[in-house]
């Protein structure tokens, strides 16, 4: 299935009206709480303004057909008890995507016919009533193998043809009862902090004039729009947490060796991990537990009293943090303190992490690009990136010792703390536009200003997550806090995230 238009590929023109649509979702939480801890000098009336139509442009029409928008755990309960069938859920989901995805362009492929066939087959399984993700419609980022679908990473130049087998993550999701309804958009070679290609710009469901972020931008947009309750993503410099924060959903990148990776040729030098985006922490924990083959990750009992570091200083003196994003971290820390955790404001020992990250980012896509049949067809910004990367590689500027020193400092820091809280992003999402037509430097500078806080956790391979914390009053897009911890702290990060969600709930989806 090759892309030849701005619409996602549907493998079946007839999605079929479903006479038995069910909406088993729990009531949507009240609107996102406005962040008021800010140093802004703008008048209070502007800071507290609710989401308006000035920039959003009213993305959804009234009266469209409803479908099971989740949470996933509610869909699973309905399937287990027999009040829902996987076919009903998938039919309604495909219909919803067909009706609404034109607003956000989250999907590059919609597996309409195949997903329905897989749902029908799922209903014949004798263990349907105990499958942990029975009937849950999921989206998969369009850069890992799904049997029979193209293996594509953001442009026709990266098309390696149809996959002959599922990636282990996809196989585990399917074995658990999930149904892959579509593949989500990716920027070319997953290199960029905004998601677009020659056919489509992936837009933020909260404000369609803003980007959904990257490189799992399609996954985040699909979840935030309520098209699927759970989506797979992968994260090399923040590619789950960046769009999760921009779109107001929960996103978690596990630590190294928790979930099978094997993204691309060599998993970006060990910096990429497969993870989850979802509307609730419970749904994310459930999906991550399946992907990791670790049922314990789905257990979200409150954590014991944690030592939490609050850090709002960015890793570079050239980075500037929007006060509303700093306020998101302060809000998360305040909620954690109210829950009884020890919170201390401090600074992270970033050292030369920015330089080490830049050098690696310049070289990580070289093996994947070298394996392409026609690398000359890549976008100009990507070709420039690869050329600079080859120069860096020839000079031998990427050394393991760089990371060893950074990780040693972080390990010493975490002798005194269990978790660190930072802003997830530094600014509101950039404008939604064809970034692939802009130069390499414009893309690099925009990405750096947008997301200085996320990449260090990829460099060392530690778990990190983004938790929604309110709304930016000028961009009408969400703000979020990042939680990160040392190796093996996935359970701690998930449980603290769930506690923050309980005490400071967010609106799950745009609709």
Image (tube, rainbow, N blue to C red):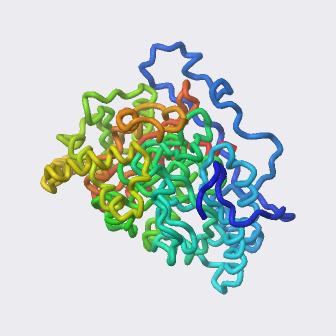
Q: Position of residue 272 (x, y in %)?
A: 35, 58
Residue in the foreground of this view, choosing between 444 and 257: 444
Residue in the foreground of this view, choosing between 344 and 291: 291
Residue in the foreground of this view, choosing between 357 and 409: 357
Residue 120 placement: quadrant: bottom right
Q: Is residue 502 visible?
A: no
Q: With 81 as the anchor, is 438 left or right in this view?
A: left
Q: Position of residue 6 (x, y in %)?
A: 64, 48
| Relative vertical location of residue 508 with respect to residue 346 in this rendering, above or below | below
Q: Position of residue 114 (x, y in %)?
A: 67, 72
| Relative vertical location of residue 126 with respect to residue 145 in this rendering, above or below | below
Q: With 409 as the anchor, is 96 left or right in this view?
A: right
Q: Residue at x 65, y 79 (%)?
A: 128
Q: Residue at x 64, y 64 (%)?
A: 181
Q: Quadrant of the C terminus?
A: top right
Residue in the foreground of this view, choosing between 161 and 111: 161
Q: Is residue 272 visible?
A: yes
Q: With 377 as the anchor, is 179 left or right in this view?
A: right
Q: Position of residue 138 (x, y in %)?
A: 60, 63
| Relative vertical location of residue 454 with respect to residue 4 in this rendering, above or below | above
Q: Residue at x 77, y 67 (%)?
A: 88
């Amino acid at each position: 299935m090759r892309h030849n238009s701005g619409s996602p590929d549907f493998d079946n023109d007839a999605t079929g009206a479903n006479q038995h649509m069910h909406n088993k979702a729990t009531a949507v939480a009240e609107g996102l709480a406005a962040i008021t801890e800010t140093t802004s000098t703008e008048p209070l009336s502007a800071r507290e303004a609710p989401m308006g139509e000035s920039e959003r442009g009213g993305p959804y029409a009234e009266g469209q057909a409803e479908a099971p928008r989740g949470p996933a755990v509610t869909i699973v309960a309905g399937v287990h008890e027999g009040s829902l069938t996987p076919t009903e859920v998938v039919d309604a989901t495909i219909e919803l995507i067909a009706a609404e995805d034109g607003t956000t362009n989250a999907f590059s492929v919609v597996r309409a016919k195949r997903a329905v066939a897989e749902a029908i087959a799922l209903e014949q399984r004798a263990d349907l009533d105990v499958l942990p993700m029975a009937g849950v419609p999921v989206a998969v980022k369009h850069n890992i193998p799904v049997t029979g679908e193209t293996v594509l990473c953001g442009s026709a130049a990266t098309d390696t043809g149809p996959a002959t087998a599922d990636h282990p993550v996809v196989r585990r999701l399917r074995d658990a009862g999930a149904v892959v309804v579509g593949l989500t958009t990716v920027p070319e070679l997953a290199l960029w902090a905004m998601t677009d290609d020659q056919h489509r710009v992936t837009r933020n469901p909260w404000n369609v004039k803003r980007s959904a972020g990257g490189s799992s931008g399609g996954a985040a947009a699909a979840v935030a729009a309520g098209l699927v309750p759970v989506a797979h993503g992968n994260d090399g410099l923040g590619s789950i947490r960046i769009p999760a924060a921009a779109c107001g959903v929960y996103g978690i990148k596990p630590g190294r060796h928790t979930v099978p990776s094997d993204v691309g040729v060599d998993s970006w030098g060990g910096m990429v991990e497969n993870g989850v985006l979802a509307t609730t922490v419970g749904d994310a924990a459930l999906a991550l537990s399946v992907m990791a083959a670790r049922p314990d990750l789905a257990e979200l009992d409150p954590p014991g009293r944690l030592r939490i570091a609050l850090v709002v200083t960015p890793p570079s003196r050239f980075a500037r943090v929007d006060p509303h994003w700093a306020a998101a971290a302060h809000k998360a820390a305040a909620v954690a303190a109210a829950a009884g955790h020890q919170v201390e404001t401090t600074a992270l020992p970033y050292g030369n992490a920015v330089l080490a990250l830049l050098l690696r980012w310049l070289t990580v896509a070289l093996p994947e690009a070298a394996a392409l049949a026609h690398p000359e067809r890549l976008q100009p910004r990507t070709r420039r990136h690869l050329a600079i990367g080859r120069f860096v590689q020839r000079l031998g500027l990427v050394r393991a010792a760089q990371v060893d020193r950074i990780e040693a400092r972080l390990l010493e820091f975490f002798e005194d703390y269990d978790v660190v809280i930072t802003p997830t992003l530094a600014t509101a999402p950039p404008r939604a536009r064809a970034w692939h037509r802009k130069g390499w430097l414009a893309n690099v500078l925009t990405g750096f200003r947008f997301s200085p806080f996320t990449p260090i956790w990829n460099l060392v391979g530690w778990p990190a997550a983004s938790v929604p914390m309110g709304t930016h009053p000028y961009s009408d897009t969400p703000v979020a806090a990042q939680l990160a911890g040392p190796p093996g702290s996935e359970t701690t990060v998930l449980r603290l995230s769930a506690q923050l969600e309980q005490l400071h709930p967010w609106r799950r989806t745009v609709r």
